[in-house]
Image (cartoon, rainbow, N blue to C red):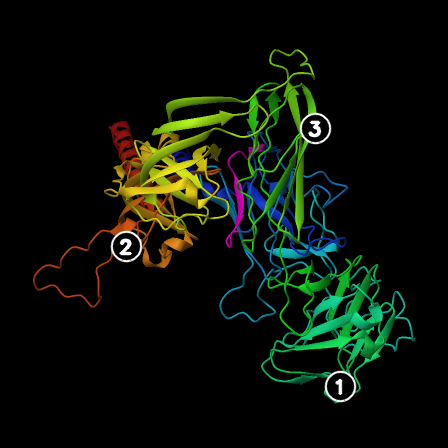
């Protein structure tokens, strides 16, 4: 059959259109994680930052997007307080840790809390639908050595950031500090590392002069920097005490740790600081046991540590730089110690000769209202704050109008219009963190409010419903701070410690979360009928009753456990938040501790908390599940939280036919690949269309020849 040119191009057009439609939507990669300063900056290792880039030709709305680490720190909601944040075409979105002083010369688009591990992280960028848009796996793969695992680029010593290449993969930035909110550099020029000569001897009271090459192949004066990782399995500098309480010459120390199981001797090794050098000359005082510590005191080394800034370097007997630590202004009485995540921090309790003690500061996540109206109460929610060590926290609010409060999430009423700087200081007895925001307060009708206005407390008795739960309350309200104090009854649906150590869930006509900051709960189990008295608040749009002591919860008896409401995935809505429900569907995807159920009406997200004992590994894509749990709300949408293994029912495999045999211990269905199925359907349709066209062409040619 001979096809003319028009027919050929028609068929080619149909094929090209089909292959365009068959491309998966997630492959576009319109927004990517573009640069990561996992090592911090030269000013501070805590000054971490990340950068996103919009590679598309149109702006992208980040509402509902989340950037998260697989270990739970950090988890960053890119847009909060209903502020719309968009990345322009080809533009950048900068995230700075803790405050906007991380990069003083560049304004952050988002301030976040939570640190990145120097050993590597798995970072995921998730859009508003829950789809993973970009993923960085910097934990290493099976079979990689210690040198190859972790962050694939960046340098902690030189503070070179990790940049995405234009082609593929990652590179270290060409200069310290990277390129925040700007095009990535051409990358670090790496020269082959050569054998380092013995470093020049330092004069007494000094260190090698500025500009001399380092013995690990790193030149501080050349633009082309050779980088060589510190030798693994060698002793490391583990702790320093530059400014002790009392006499420096007696209490200063440098501590080393031996990561090997075998004894190591530092005889002939050398320590350098800005103020001098020390060589280990006695075997007895130079030995580090396997997995042990060696503390060298200033009384032995005569080597002072500067209180302003210093660099401590450890050289082997052959002159190789084994390890080095830099620090800025020393904090009196605190040691500079290495934590378990490989980060250096000032520790309140020096521990010479033993494992380091460090108390991480509380992690703040505060929701500040953007605007308020004079005379109207407004909630300041810091309920997401937590202490990594679980220490009790104190709170101090300053509302900028002469009033203060010590509640975690107070309700405050401004009496006069204007701009107020609201500050929260949270502490764990050893550390304090602060966060502040400017709140614009409007008059009720735009008019000014008299500063002589006073507020009066009133007491009322009422019966009402909160989130569907019948409440008999004696409430006291104040226009300056505090919520309503309520008394309610219900049945325990989730006991304390399952979905959170500070919460449990109560079921009645509907549901409410019970919260206690200090975890002061009596022993409760599902089905217990109780009475609870507390302050009515909310968290992430969910009703919450906050109690103060265990006496606020009284056991009245035992009732039948609450029954879940059976729902289709499409019926999940804000009305079900806090409710015990049951969903049935096919497990279509597993991501970390999250699974996705599809019942053909919609897809639902199920999150498996560690305390439930449920392992994702025991669940298979493609199998049918019945899942019971509490509906929870996050920035990325609604999700279901099962309480235990009993809340997940896996469909039983069908019995094999008589005479059938199987080499498997159980029958399994192949997981459905919906994209592959769609591709097959489109191929069939395209093939049918082409056959019809060819038939029409042949018929036309036949008629034409008659």
Image point (57%, 45%), residue name: 32
Image point (27%, 48%), residue name: 625
- Which quadrant: the N terminus? top left
Crowding around mark 1 (Cα neighbors within 10 Å: few <14, some 14 to 19, many 20+) is some
Q: Is residue 340 left or right of residue 174?
A: left
Q: Is residue 477 left or right of residue 291?
A: left
Where on the picture, by quarter, is residue 219? bottom right
Image point (59%, 26%), residue name: 480
Image point (24%, 42%), residue name: 559
Residue 402's disc number = 3
Q: Please, what secondary structure does the residue beneath circle 1 have?
A: loop
Q: Is residue 377 visible?
A: yes
Give the CA distance from mark 2 to mark 3: 66 Å
Lower sequence index among marks 2 and 3: 3
Residue 613, x across and y down, in percent: 36, 57
Per the rendered image, the range of residues in magenta is 58-72
- Seen in the picture, residue 584 relative to 163 is either above or below; the reply is above
> In front: mark 1 or mark 2?
1
Q: Check if residue 466 falls in the magenta segment.
A: no
Q: Is residue 307 left or right of residue 229?
A: right
Residue 73, x across and y down, in percent: 55, 51
Residue 670's disc number = 2
Give the residue pinned by disc 1: 267
């Amino acid at each position: 059959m001979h096809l003319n040119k028009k027919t050929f191009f028609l068929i080619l057009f149909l094929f090209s259109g089909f292959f365009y439609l068959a491309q998966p939507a997630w492959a576009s990669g319109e927004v990517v994680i573009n640069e990561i300063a996992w090592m911090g900056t030269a000013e501070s290792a805590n000054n971490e930052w990340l950068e996103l880039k919009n590679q598309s030709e149109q702006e992208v709305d980040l509402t509902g997007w989340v950037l998260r680490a697989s270990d739970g720190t950090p988890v960053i909601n890119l847009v909060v307080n209903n502020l719309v944040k968009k990345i322009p075409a080809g533009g950048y979105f900068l995230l700075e840790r803790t405050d906007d002083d991380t990069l003083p010369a560049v304004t952050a688009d988002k301030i976040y809390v939570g640190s990145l591990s120097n050993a590597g992280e798995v970072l995921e960028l998730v859009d508003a639908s829950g789809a993973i848009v970009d993923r960085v796996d910097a934990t290493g793969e099976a079979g990689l050595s210690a040198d190859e695992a972790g962050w694939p680029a960046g340098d902690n010593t030189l503070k070179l950031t990790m940049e995405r290449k234009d082609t593929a993969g990652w590179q270290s930035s060409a200069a310290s500090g990277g390129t925040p909110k700007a095009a990535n550099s051409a990358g670090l020029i790496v020269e082959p590392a050569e054998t380092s000569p013995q470093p020049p001897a330092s004069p007494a009271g000094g260190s090698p002069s500025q500009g001399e090459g380092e013995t690990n192949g790193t030149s501080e004066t050349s633009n082309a920097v050779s980088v060589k990782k510190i030798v693994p399995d060698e002793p490391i500098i583990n702790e320093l005490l530059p400014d002790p309480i009392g006499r420096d010459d007696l209490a200063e120390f440098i501590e080393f740790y031996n990561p090997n199981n075998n004894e190591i001797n530092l005889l002939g090794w050398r320590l350098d600081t800005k103020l001098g050098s020390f060589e280990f000359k006695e075997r007895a005082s130079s030995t580090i046991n396997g997995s042990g510590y060696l503390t060298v005191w200033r009384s032995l080394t005569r080597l002072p540590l500067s209180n302003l800034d210093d660099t401590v370097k450890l050289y082997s007997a052959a002159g190789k730089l084994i390890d080095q630590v830099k620090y800025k202004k020393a904090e009196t009485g605190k040691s500079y110690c290495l934590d378990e995540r490989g980060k250096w921090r000032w520790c309140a309790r020096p521990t010479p000769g033993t494992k380091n003690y460090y108390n991480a500061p509380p992690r703040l996540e505060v929701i500040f209202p953007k605007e308020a109206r004079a005379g109207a109460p407004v909630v300041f929610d810091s309920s997401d704050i937590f202490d990594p060590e679980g220490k009790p926290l104190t709170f101090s609010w300053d509302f900028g109008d002469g009033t203060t409060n010590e509640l975690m999430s107070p309700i405050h009423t401004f009496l006069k219009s204007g701009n107020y700087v609201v500050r929260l200081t949270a502490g764990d007895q050893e550390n304090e963190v602060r966060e502040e925001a400017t709140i614009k307060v409007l008059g009720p009708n735009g008019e000014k409010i008299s500063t002589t206005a006073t507020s009066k407390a009133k007491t009322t008795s009422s019966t009402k419903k909160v989130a569907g739960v019948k409440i008999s309350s004696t409430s006291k309200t104040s226009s300056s701070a505090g919520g309503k104090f309520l008394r309610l009854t219900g049945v325990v649906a989730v006991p304390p410690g399952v979905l959170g150590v500070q919460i449990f869930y109560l079921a009645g006509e509907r549901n409410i979360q019970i919260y206690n900051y200090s975890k002061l709960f009596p022993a409760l189990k599902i089905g217990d009928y109780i009475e609870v008295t507390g302050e009515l608040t909310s968290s992430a749009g969910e009703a919450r009753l906050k109690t103060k002591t265990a006496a606020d919860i009284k056991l009245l008896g035992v009732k039948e456990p609450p029954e879940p409401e059976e729902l289709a995935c499409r019926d999940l809505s804000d009305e079900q938040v806090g409710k015990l429900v049951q969903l049935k569907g096919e497990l279509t995807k597993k991501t970390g501790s999250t699974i996705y159920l599809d019942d053909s009406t919609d897809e639902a997200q199920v999150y498996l908390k560690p305390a439930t004992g449920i392992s994702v590994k025991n669940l298979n894509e493609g199998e049918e599940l019945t899942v019971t749990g509490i509906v929870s709300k996050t920035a990325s949408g609604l999700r279901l939280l099962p309480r235990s293994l009993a809340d997940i029912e896996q469909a039983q495999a069908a019995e094999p036919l008589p005479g059938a045999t199987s080499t498997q211990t159980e029958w399994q269905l192949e997981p459905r690949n919906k994209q592959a199925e769609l591709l097959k359907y489109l191929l069939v349709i395209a093939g049918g269309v082409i056959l019809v066209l060819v038939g029409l062409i042949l018929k036309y040619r036949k008629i034409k020849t008659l």
